[in-house]
Amino acid sequence: HPKSPDVEVCEDEGTEIWIPHHISDLDKCGHVVVKYEPTDDPKHPGYGDDAYIARRAELNAIARTYKHGDPLPQVEYTPAEQATWRTAYTALKELRKDFTCSEYQKNIEKMEAAGLITAERIPSIQALSDYIQRRTGFQLRPCGGLLSARDFLASLAFRVFQTTFYTRHPSKPHHCPEPDVIHEILGHCPMFADPEIAQVSQEIGLLSLGASDEQIERLATLYWFTVEFGLCEQDGKVKAIGAGLISAYGELKHACSDVPEHKPFDPAVTAVTTYEDSDYQPMYFVTKSIKDVMDKLKTYAASMSKSFVNVYDPYSQTVRQMPPE
Ligand code: HBI
Ligand code: FE
């Protein structure tokens, strides 16, 4: 089910919504939402492809057995999956200079120079996780598909990013209606190596812990329009900061063109804007910088009605709920 795994009364702070307190509690935050799956969506490129569906299910099943502290699964990708990766990677590399933000370019270039990301094969998720952890403390853990927004956002509070392992369908190497490993690696990983995006992501995660369903919806929308589909101004142009754009050949060019509407990022407006998750966005929010996202998020957070604030202690990898000051 899409909500929290179970409901407990937290005696001292009075919230009735279960939250993960320790990073290992994320083992209970893997609830999958059925949406855009090849099994039941005729628009999914893998619809009706039994071999693809079986492979996707196999990789999701491996992901779901993962427990905090386990080594990440070392998947042997097939030659066909490697070919899909190569096609997507090569095409996106061409667009990088013109359409992605400088933070992305700097980080992916470093990862390429270190031999972590190459055209030849799908990178090791463990090696990427180790790399990102050294830069921003973010780590990757496997998940079995699209998660409930509550579970997905909760992990961000602990600087953990839930990562899918299956690849997109080979007939559509430039697009996938759901997250896939190519989106995670090319879209998210280099951005999670950026300290400011890491901070924005964790902040949204912390705000989500113990939040009402309505607040979760707003925070998921903020995440969607920034970390996933955000644009920023750089060198007098709009450039992608969002992973959903950076990893999608068609939508990346569309987003930075004059076709869609561009509005200034303002959390109070952005959080209540409905988004398109089955086609290109008709509208994108543009921020001055990633730091500007963080500054505005802080102001927005102060306006949320909350009876507690969540504080993360990185030494114990624990979240504590404190009375607001
Ligand atoms: N689950 N695995 C996964 N990946 C996502 O990007 C993701 C998700 N669940 C919910 C979700 N994104 C969106 O609701 C975000 O806006 C939070
Ligand atoms: Fe994503």
Image: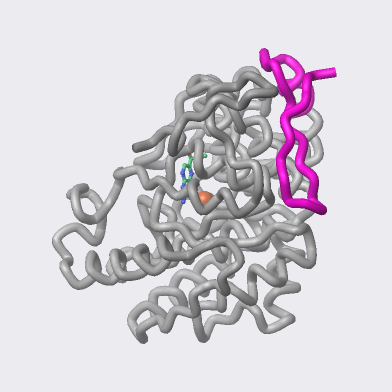
Residue 308 horizontal/vertical position (percent): 72, 21
Residue sitting nearer the eye, 213 or 175: 213
Q: Tell me which segment is drawn in magenta.
A: 298-325
Q: Is residue 154 left or right of residue 178?
A: right
Give the answer, above or below, for where 307 lies relative to 198.
above
Residue 227 horizontal/vertical position (percent): 61, 44
In the rendered image, which quarter contains the N terminus? top left
In the rendered view, how is the structure colored? one colour
Residue sitting nearer the eye, 12 or 219: 12
Residue sitting nearer the eye, 249 or 45: 45
Residue 94: say if magenta: no
Residue at x-position 57% and y-position 58%: 187
- Asked if one can make out residue 224 in the rendered structure from this viewpoint, the answer is yes
Residue at x-position 22% and y-position 49%: 43
Residue 321: say if magenta: yes
Give the answer, above or below, for where 296 lies relative to 57.
above
Residue 192 horizontal/vertical position (percent): 68, 56
